[in-house]
Image (cartoon, helix red, strand yellow):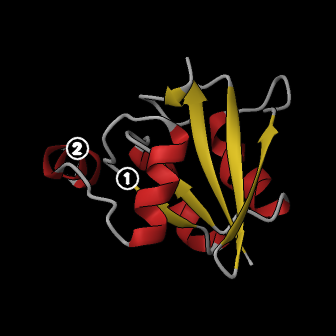
């Protein structure tokens, strides 16, 4: 089973990972999708979010922008990260995910992955 987390603000993908109202979680098993909301615990630091998501069984995260400092935390937790995904409603994003049609904005990817000078 896969559990896909989408950070949500105002009923759409949050512009910044970690700066959202809640995560919409989509549990996917054999093309059957169940949805629930996962509230971020108060006082949770952004650097703790990848571990917290892993503890909640999250296998994939769909995001627009992510602080480059936490990219390695996702990799070490074996949580797949889809970054630079255009802002849209969670249901539309999960449909694209299921169809293998999620696309990332190359400018956002470059912004996140370019090394600091």
Query: Is 114 displayed left or right of 87 in the figure?
Result: left
For the point 63% across and 36% down, which residue is it?
A: 46
Residue 21 point in image, percent of width and height: 67, 22
Query: For the image shown, how many numbered marks are present on the structure?
Result: 2
Circle 2 packing at 10 Å, graded few (<14), some (14-19), many (20+), is some
> Between residues 9 and 51, which one lies in front from this camera angle?
9
Check whether the beta carbons of the residues at disc 2 and disc 1 lie within 8 A of each other: yes
Residue 48 point in image, percent of width and height: 72, 45
Residue located beneath label 1 in the image: 83
Q: Residue lying furthest bottom in this view?
A: 30
> Between residues 114 and 19, which one lies in front from this camera angle?
19
Rendered view: 19 above or below 79: above
Name which quarter of the figure residue 103 lies in.
bottom left
For the point 68% across and 39% down, which residue is it?
A: 23
Residue located beneath label 2 in the image: 108
Rendered view: 9 above or below 74: above
Which quadrant: the N terminus?
bottom right
Q: Between disc 2 and disc 1, whose residue precedes?
A: 1
Residue 82 point in image, percent of width and height: 42, 59
Residue 83 point in image, percent of width and height: 37, 52
């Amino acid at each position: 089973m896969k559990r896909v987390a989408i950070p949500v603000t105002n009923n759409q993908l949050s512009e910044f990972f970690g700066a959202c109202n809640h995560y919409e979680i989509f549990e996917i098993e054999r093309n059957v999708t169940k949805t629930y909301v996962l509230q971020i615990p108060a006082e949770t630091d952004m650097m703790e979010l990848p571990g917290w998501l892993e503890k909640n069984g999250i296998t994939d995260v769909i995001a627009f922008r992510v602080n480059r400092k936490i990219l390695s935390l996702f990799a070490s937790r074996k949580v797949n990260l889809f970054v630079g995904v255009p802002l849209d409603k969670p249901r539309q994003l999960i449909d694209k995910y299921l169809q293998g049609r999620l696309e990332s904005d190359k400018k956002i990817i470059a912004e996140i992955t370019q090394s600091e000078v």
